[in-house]
Amino acid sequence: MTTPAYTLIVNESDSAAFEILADGKGEITPILKDATVLAAFFEKRLPEYHLDEGFVLAVLLRRKWLIRRHPEHEQVFRRLFSGKEICLDRLVLAGERSRFADKTRASLEGLMFKTRRIRDREWPVEALSTVFPDGISLLITFEPRSLFKGASLLFKELSDFFVRAASTGKEKLSSSDLAFLQHLDKEWITTVHRSVRERGRPKFVLVDMDTPGVVELPSLREFAARVGAWFRGIGLLENLRYACSTPCGGVHLVFEINRRAEEKIFRCSEEFRRDLAEIMRPYAGKMALEDIEIKTGQVLTHVPGVNPYVKDLTATVQKGGEA
C-alpha cells in the first residue's frame, strides 16, 4: 500500500490543515487519472461543432460529492468548505478536435503546480487532488458555445470599461475595474460560457438523475442496459448522445432535441421522470420526481478520466437498446 504525500489533519479548533509527510516520499494523486478515456470522450462523444464554436471545461471540487462518498466525515467537509463548490480551473477548447485531449492534459498537469484559496489560506492543488480525489471532477458544456458571441460580449465589457476610465480617470478606477483588467483571461472564459449557439444549430438536454444514495457501477451498468431498451421502445434511443455515471453514484443522460424528444422529455416530463425512477428503483430505491432534473442551456456534464466514479455508459445504453 502506497503512502500519500499529504494527510488531512483536523485540529481541535475545528479548522483543517494539510501536513506533508516527514519523509517527503509519499505519492501524489494526479488530477488526470486516465488519459485514454479522456481522449475517447473527445473523439466519440462530443457533438459536431463549427470553427467559430467551442466548449468550456471546468475542474470542480464539490463538497456534495465528498459527503456522498464519505458520509462519516460530513461535518469535517462542511467545516472545511464553506461553499458548495470550488472552481479549481476553467478553459475554452476550440479548434481541431484531435488536439482537445492534449490541451486538456497539459492544462490539468499545469494545474497541479498551482494553489487555490479555501477559507483563509492557500492550498496546493496537488494536495487537494491527493486528499480529495473523490471530490474533484472535470465537467464540460456539452452544447458548444459561440466564440463570436463570447467575443462580442467581452468587447462590450471592454468598451464599457474604457468609457468609465475616460470619465473618472485611471487613478480613480474601482477595485472591480482593476480586477477586470487583471483577469481578462477569466473574463473571456466567462463570456464564452454565457454565449449560446446560433439558431438552427442542434440543441441538447441533460437528464440528471441524482439518486438518494450511492449506486455502485455494476448496478448502474445494469440500469443503463435496461433504460436503453426502454429508450428504444419510446423512440428516444437515436437521440441519446452521451451517458455517464456521476461522482454521487447517479447518472447523466444527454439527448439531442428534436420533435420526438420535445414530446417525450418536455411535454410528458412528469411521466418521463416517473418511468425513469421506476427503472432505477431496484438499484436506488424510491426516487422523488425532484431527484430527476431536466436541464437545458449549459448542459454541463462530467468527462471521464478525472473522477474515479465517472464512467462512460453510452455504449451500455446503446447495446441495451439493441438487445
Image (cartoon, rainbow, N blue to C red):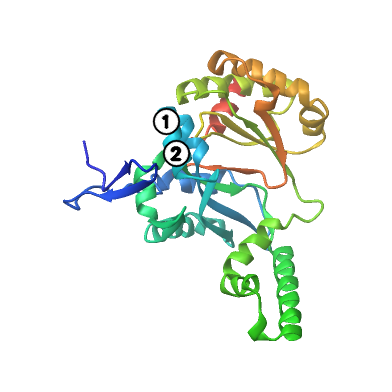
| Residue 88 seen in render | yes
- Left/right placement of residue 117 relative to residue 234 reads left
Quarter of the C terminus within the rendering: top right
Tags 1 and 2 in contact by the CB under 8 Å rule? yes
Q: Amino acid at mark 2?
A: Phe
* Residue nearest the viewer, comparing 265 with 127: 127
As drawn, the residue found furthest toward the front would be 13
Question: Mark 1: few, some, or many residues within 10 Å (few <14, many ≥20)?
Answer: few
- Mark 1, secondary structure of its residue: loop
Where is mark 1, residue-wise?
Answer: 70
Where is mark 2, residue-wise?
Answer: 77
- Mark 1 vs mark 2, CA separation in Å: 9 Å
Residue at the location (47% across, 52% down)?
119
Give residue 84's quadrant in the image. Answer: top right
Q: Choose the circle earlier in sequence order: 1 or 2.
A: 1
Q: Amino acid at mark 1?
A: His
Residue at the location (52% across, 36% down)?
64
Give residue 318's quadrant in the image. Answer: top right
Residue 83 image label: none
Question: Mark 2: few, some, or many residues within 10 Å (few <14, many ≥20)?
Answer: some
69 w.r.t. 103: above or below = above
